[in-house]
Image: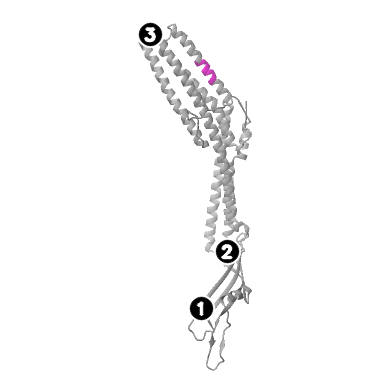
Amino acid sequence: NLPIGTQLELSMNTTRLTTNSALATLNPEYDATGLLTVRQPLLGGFAASARKQLSSAENQLDAGKARYDQAVMAAKGDVERTYWDLYAAERDYAVNRVSVDRAREFLKETQLRAETGLVGSNQVASAKTFLAEQELQLFDSEEQLGHQSDLLAALIGVQPTDSTMRFVAMDAPPSDFTPEPIETLVARAQKNNLDLQAAQKDIGAAQTLADAAQWEALPKLDLIGTVGGNGLLGNSQLVTIPGFATFAGPGGSFGEALNQAIKRDYPTWSVGVELSIPIGLRSGLGEKDRLDAQVVSAQQRSVEFSRQLEEQVRAAYREVANGKGRLQAAKDGVDAAEEQVRIGLIEFRTGRVTAFELVRLGEDLATAQQRYSAALVRTAKAAATLKQLTSDESITTNSR
């Protein structure tokens, strides 16, 4: 099959015939027929129809390569986001350890004050409850830290080798990002995102088949030409017919008969056209409509992905843009909670608040610390998402 739809067929047919007829001049008889057939569709679209499968496959190959490269970038983004989750889990674990230590000191102080009659036994019970809750949270945070380490190990394919069997985050997330303009990021994503490029290649693959179907829906008119040669030899056998002279056929081997066909000792040729008109052209037109529908479907999938991509870029941009303010608000919350605990301890020692109220303040401080941990890594994770969505290894945000 040539790129313009020409079909070339070279064939060699041979037969060996034996007979018990006394009138056969050759026994066995070797027949050889060599034939070169050329068929050229005249209404088949030439290259458009002949190359349809190859062109479609080339587009699908490009789409597959783009999706692979995007998957590589997605894996990098997953590793980076998991790393920041590990950092947040480590910080939460450290905060919980400090909370447990504070809870133990608070319980000791409450017990001493209870022994001197300054507070009642109910406040000692509140301190014990607070310590138990903090210890349980410490176990939970330790398990979460181990889980995040396992997730990172699964992503990078390497297990930690230290005594704790756990990865430790060495880098802190940047505290300030200056994102590029949102329209710049959206335009970059629409241009560079490899998944979107793959979706557009899918359109090209479907369009190639649809364009070919337009030609193939026409009546089929083929120009056919053949060039060949025949060979006829065998073991010579005398034939005797009363009233005629004795005669015999040309003797020769099977290989010599093949040589006759190849050398065209007895040439043949033919030229003609073959016309085929399907009734109503319904089969070809129906296939064209089906492939046109596949093109529209591929186009709509590309449009849908483009819109989703823009939505994801804008959402990630907002997280990056609000990162500085969110982090400052979380830090202010931690500072305020620590100040409340400090004042609460003073008031507890002067008898102005109970242990139960101080426990509530300690819980508020732990919550504020967890929010601060989440705020620390949220912006960095959003920046990693922007890099993945724009399919750009260069810096998409300026960090300080």
Measuring 55% from the left and 77% from the top, which residue is drawn there? 30
Q: Mark 3 is on which residue type? A: Ala
- Say which element carries label 3: helix
The type of colouring in the image is one colour
Whichever of labels 3 and 2 marks the residue nearer the N terminus, that label is 3
- Work out which residue is located at the far bottom of the displayed protein and give it: 243
Measuring 49% from the left and 36% from the top, which residue is drawn there? 154
Q: Is residue 208 visible?
A: yes
Quarter of the figure that contains the C terminus: top right
Q: Quadrant of residue 227?
A: bottom right
Q: Are there few (<14), some (14-19), or many (20+) residues within 10 Å of tag 1?
A: few
- The residue beneath circle 2 is 220
Report the span colored magenta.
330-337
- Say which element carries label 1: strand
The circle drawn on residue 114 is: 3
- Marks 3 and 2, how far apart at CA: 103 Å
Identify whether 124 is placed above or below 54. Answer: above
Q: Are there few (<14), some (14-19), or many (20+) residues within 10 Å of tag 3?
A: some
Q: Mark 2 is on which residue type? A: Lys
Q: Where residue 267 sits: x, y (%)?
A: 62, 76
Q: Mark 1 is on which residue type? A: Leu
Q: Are there few (<14), some (14-19), or many (20+) residues within 10 Å of tag 2?
A: some
- Marks 1 and 3, how far apart at CA: 120 Å
The circle drawn on residue 17 is: 1
Q: Are marks 1 and 2 in contact (CB under 8 Å)?
A: no
Magenta segment includes 368:
no
Whichever of labels 1 and 2 marks the residue nearer the N terminus, that label is 1
Q: Is residue 363 visible?
A: no
